[in-house]
Amino acid sequence: MIRNYFKIAWRNLLKKKGFTAINIIGLSLGIGCFIMISMFVIDEISYDRYHEKADRIYRINSDVIFGGTELSMAVTSDPMGEVLKNDYPEVENYVRFYASQGSKLIKKGSEYINEGAVAHADSTLFNVFTLPAIIGDPKIALKDPNTVVITETAANRYFGSPQLAIGQFLETDDNGKTLYKVTSVIEDMPKNSHFNFDFFFSMANVNYDFGNYLSHNFHTYVLLKEGVDYKAFNKNFIAVIDKYLLPQAAQIIDISSMDDFEASGNKLEYSLIPLTDIHLRSSRGIELSANGNIQYVYIFSAAALFILLIACVNFINLTTARSSGRAKEVGIRKVLGSEKKSLIGQFLTESTLIAILALFVGLLFVWLSLSWFNGVSGKEMLMTSLLSPKFLIFIFVLPFIVGGLAGAYPAFFLSSFQPIKVLKGKLSLGHKKNTLRNFLVIFQFATSIILIVGTIVIYKQLNHIQNSNLGFNKDQVVVISNSGLSSETRQSLKNEIEQLTEVKSASFAGYLPVSSSSRSDTTFSTESVMTESNGFNMQYWNIDYDYLETIGMEIKAGRNFSRDFGSDSTGIILNETAVKLSGFVNPIGKKLYTIDGNGDLEGYTIIGVVKNFNFASLRENVGGLCFQLGNNSWESAYRFNTTDISGLLSTIESKYKAAAPGMPFEYEFLDEAFDNMYRQERRVGTVAMAFAILAIIIACLGLFGLATYIAEQRTKEIGVRKVLGATVANIVKMLSKDFVKLVIIAFVIATPIAWWFMNKWLQEFAFRIDLTWGVFAVTGFVALVVALITLSFQAIKAAIANPVNSLRSE
């Protein structure tokens, strides 16, 4: 029976090649998109799940509000993990990462390599995380100072193999020069990890004032015992704050209790976040890597599902549209004894066969598109991932699900025809009784319009970011890394490069207004005795005399630092937000107080105010910031005025190599570093555009097919109208007007939905565009024009046909 179903199904598909081609193309695009997005989603939700104890590992997050400044951080104080393990039996173990240095210079032969994937870690690292060793015992590998655990890739790069690496030494630029002994080599970490280091150095080598509960610089993870509810455990942090943090804070701030602190509108809070939630549900300050976004996973998943549904809708529409062509087949088979269930089985077999064929074409589409999709999404997915048992089962089941979804209604619809009416010729569906079909066309175009609106809004927001008045000039600034150079060499290089005619100004610029740059915050007060009501937190950057000019910032009041004023060593420059936090109406000449190296409050005089500038993402409001004269020479910034950028870089590199042989020459442009902050949004915009184009193509395929069948069904009507004097324009209008109405209805339905979604997305940005009606008008016009172009081909073809051909048999 099943064999017979497939044989009949195959004959029917070959008989209607146009119908078959449209359905296969539409379904294959839908299935291909669905598979690619499924690969993306599975990769995103798989982050950090490879750890054997992943369900019991949690990171400690910190949330601080002080004086109107809010800090949401992925780090905590260095003693926090140890305190929790010692005081609470629910904690089985803990581990810390110290990655504040960002990178290390590691010597290979006579050259240094700037390695970014580095961190210092506790020896408990391997008791918490699953990082399989190739050679050496990782559980004891980091217990001693001057030890390091490296990955297989690092071992091959520096020593040739893991076996040759054991017992060897790596020379770094720590404290001028430090040798680390390789005590273990582990497997490369999977890509789907929120941290991915090649070097784990001993925590004993960190030069840090340990035991400070008020300084937050360590990523700390705790391993809870089986059955512990982490949400309930969060309540213990209140006692930890009272016991350990409050006594230290009271030495600096006149504070008697946390209740008083919170009564002034402040907050200090710690919480645990599950390891497996970090990648998609954490976007805090000082993350170990750029995380994903669960909203984008939802958006991509929904878009892929809707595209697949649009393709299924095409099948339903086309099948029901040509139902009159198969009515006699159904009538005759019923008269000859076929049961309804056998007819349903026949039609479901046809839809499943189309879905199977579409699956193979869809897999070809995935293979051709995967490299592009990887580039857009930042992934490294391979076709071989489809060979995993779970994915193979998914791929095997998918055409049956799609075939059943697309073929269910047509199967029940066609099998319900009454043979007497069919064989008497009383069944005439034509272009009437098409309520469901109209609804499905509206669904297709409404979905396409929503995707188009989303694409336009994303690109308008990105363009707004690119062209906003940032408060600084990001163009024509190159930033050179000075890591590993002595202070004398750094100053000498800066002086030499500054003399080039192409260079307008130069500055040491360890702190830059891009999120990838260094950050430093501290607490200030408006009085010499700090309290919970007069204190506030803000960014605290050391700069030199030429920084503001080089980065292109604007002095709003007062003056810049000057070599003519020796007192500027205790002077500070604030941004407008910092002035607002201080409460000063006329800030110039006023003093702010902060903690010095001895733990005492030291006063600094405000000499200038700069216009607010975005030193973080435009998703956030501009925070408070203070400039002070100091050393930030680990990077240099040069503002240039030449179009021969490659020539300038070549000149700078030659001077750099001459002054610092063996050191890596690394640079980036400030505008590129700024653009990188919005890389994820650009990726989403590109994928959304691709989805929108595919959705409209699939919808138009269905519209084309419907127009074809309706034109066929109304051939004689068109012939009669032409004989009676109807023009080509009249015929085209007649055939198109019903579909145009559907597109307009789809636009009316889609507009408020698209507005709601995109308005919610824009709320993530403190600086955002306004959603104007122009966006929706353009989208509606595009959808209408595309629909008219699709319809006009068949409409004009039917309209210019010779009426004699359709009426000669009458």
Image (cartoon, helix red, strand yellow):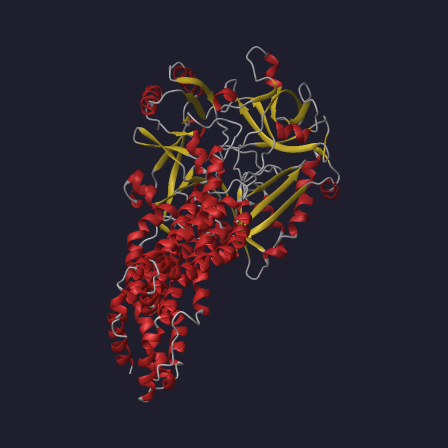
Q: Is residue 644 visible?
A: yes
Q: Is residue 704 left or right of residue 293?
A: left
Q: How many marks?
A: 0
Q: Residue furthest front?
A: 724
Give the image location of residue 76, x and y in percent: 57, 42
Give the image location of residue 196, x and y in percent: 42, 45
Residue nearer the viewer, 578 or 25 = 25
Q: Is residue 202 visible?
A: no
Quadrant location of the N terminus?
A: bottom left
Q: Is residue 23 left or right of residue 520?
A: left
Q: Residue furthest top?
A: 564
Give the image location of residue 794, x and y in percent: 32, 60
Rendered image quadrant of residue 482 = top left
Quadrant location of the C terminus?
A: bottom left
Give the image location of residue 662, x and y in percent: 32, 26
Rendered image quadrant of residue 64 = top right
**Position of 660 relative to 531 (above/below):** above
**Position of 279 relative to 487 (above/below):** below
Residue nearer the viewer, 121 or 580 = 580
Residue nearer the viewer, 402 or 451 = 451
Q: Is residue 783 left or right of residue 157?
A: right
Rendered image quadrant of residue 425 = bottom left
**Position of 261 relative to 134 (above/below):** above
**Position of 162 relative to 317 (above/below):** above
Residue nearer the viewer, 126 or 611 = 611
